[in-house]
Image (cartoon, grey):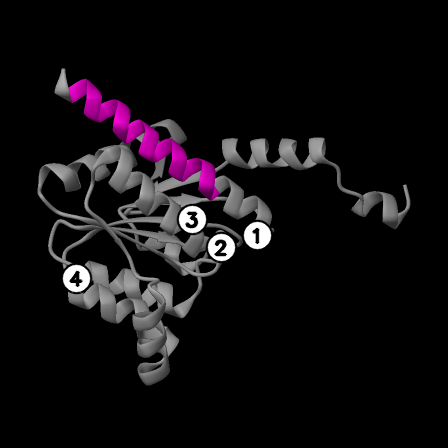
Amino acid sequence: MNEAQKLKQNASRYFKNIFEFLLVTRVTGCQGEEISLDEGGDQAAQMILTVLAGSNKAMLIGNGGSAALASHTHNDLIKSVKVPSLVFTEVPILTALTNDDGYAVAFEQQVDLWAKPGDLLVVISSSGRSENILRAAQAARRHGCCLITLSGFHPDNPLRILGDLNFYVPAEDYGYVESVHAVLLHFITDQAIIFKNIKMR
């Protein structure tokens, strides 16, 4: 097989790779303990419902494609799960903070403003190494928030050790990592809806 053939992509292979990365996604707790994917998904859904039960809110952050995933999940949490939620990507305030103080602190400053004990921060980052993401996660910790992280690329990325619950996709391609993150987030919100409906019966 020549190099061109090795690089050739097709839909079936691409979808198969995404499926495989979904199944090998690793979940760890705040002490680095391994958690099964099924248990991690259920715990994440319960964390969302805990926010709702405590009259708290969820906050979601990401850069680039991960910001789009944060916004999509924000919509689902508000519309379908009925959880008060925020994203910090409104253009005027984001550009104002970035222009005046730098992008590294733009999310951190908003977390400092809005975060309260018992709130939940969902952090989405393919690399798990972006400074603005890490600073926001650390700010959430200072304010007594719960933290769910979704990351990928290298297994030693620093974001992966910050959360109460950490989902890690062992892939080094943005397309694979972001696709798996999207499916995970859809599952978690759908599972939260199911758990909520069960409790209401």
Q: Residues within 10 Å of mark 2 (few under 14, many from 20)?
A: some
> Do callouts 4 and 3 mark residues in contact (Cβ within 8 Å)?
no
How far apart in space, not on screen, are marks 4 and 1 (Cα)? Answer: 30 Å
Q: Residues within 10 Å of mark 4 (few under 14, many from 20)?
A: few
1 sits left or right of 65 in the view = right
Q: Residues within 10 Å of mark 1 (few under 14, many from 20)?
A: some
Cα separation, mark 4 vs mark 2, equals 23 Å
SS state under label 3: helix
The CA span between labels 3 and 2 is 6 Å
Q: Which label was assigned to residue 114?
A: 4
Q: Contact (CB < 8 A) between labels 1 and 2?
A: yes
Left/right placement of residue 2 relative to residue 137 reads right
Dot label at residue 174: 1
Query: Which comes before the other along the chain, label 4 or label 2?
Result: 2
Mark 4 or 3, nearer chain start: 3
Residue, x 39% and y 69% (percent of image)?
131
Which residue is tagged 2? Answer: 65
> Which quarter of the picture shows residue 45?
top left
Horizontal and vertical percent position of residue 21 = 55, 37
Horizontal placement of 188 versus 57: left or right? right
Quarter the N terminus occupies? top right
> According to the image, label 3 marks what residue?
69
Segment tinted magenta in the rendering: 181-199
Q: Secondary structure at mark 4?
A: helix
Q: Check if mark 3's residue and mark 2's residue have beta carbons within 8 Å.
A: yes
